[in-house]
Image: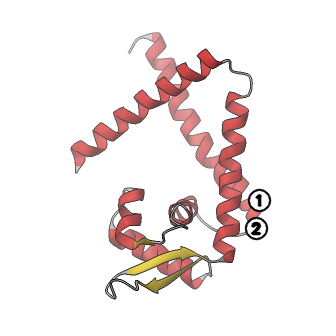
Amino acid sequence: MDEFSEKLNNLLVETFNRILKLEEQMLKAHSKMNLSISEFHVIEAVGKGEQKPKTISELAVDLGVTIPSVTNAIKKLEVNGYVQKVKSETDGRSILVSLTRLGKKVDSVHKYFHQKMVTALTKDLNEQEKTSLEQGINRLDKFFKEKLDLEK
């Protein structure tokens, strides 16, 4: 690996780890709830469907995990009062998941963290730098999507 590639690799790994750690710390500090980062992300995925509650299968696809993993997470979140499940009116076999008031509060804190992170990252960038940053992150995202598709 050349010097630039090594520096970039270290930066990506360290940044990823710091984002996860900071996100978990900030969310716990603001929400006073003992949720894992993956549980926050399940709540976030459910919250994205507030106009149209989502099924367990849809959540699994959105999160890129198995249906049993989402089922277990939703059961735990339901017991703790963050989500509620309701049978679909159009298809009695389907269960729809939505956030409770408490779940919406946690989701709001999570969204606030992301908003603060993006604002801090972009506040001093000019339009060209913003475009370059977006292009670089899109390339990184494309790489991960392609690698994940190969594994399925």
Residue type, numbered disc 2: Lys
Residue found 60% across the figure and 15% down from its top: 128
- Determine whether, in the image, residue 104 is placed left or right of residue 57: right
Type of amino acid under label 1: Ala
Measured as percent of width and height from the top left, residue 129 is found at 61, 17
Give the quadrant of the N terminus. Answer: top left
How far across and how far down the image is residue 10, in percent? Answer: 51, 26
Q: CA distance from mark 2 to mark 1?
A: 6 Å
Q: Which residue is mark 1?
A: 29
Q: Quadrant of residue 67?
A: bottom left
Colouring: secondary structure
The residue lying toward the viewer, choosing from 76 and 81, is 81
Up-down relation of residue 97 to residue 130 (above or below): below
Residue indicated by mark 2 = 32
- The residue depicted at 56 percent of the width and 41 percent of the height is 17
Direction front: furthest residue:
90
Q: Residue at x 36, y 38 (%)?
A: 144
Res 86 label: none
SS of the residue under disc 1:
helix
Q: Badge 2 local density, few (<14 within 10 Å), some, or many (20+)?
A: few
Give the class, few, some or many, for how many residues have Cα within 10 Å of label 1's Cα (few <14, many ≥20): few
Query: Residue 65, percent across and down?
Result: 36, 60
Left or right of residue 5: residue 118: right
User: Is residue 33 shown above or below 64?
Assistant: below
Left or right side of 81 for 12: left
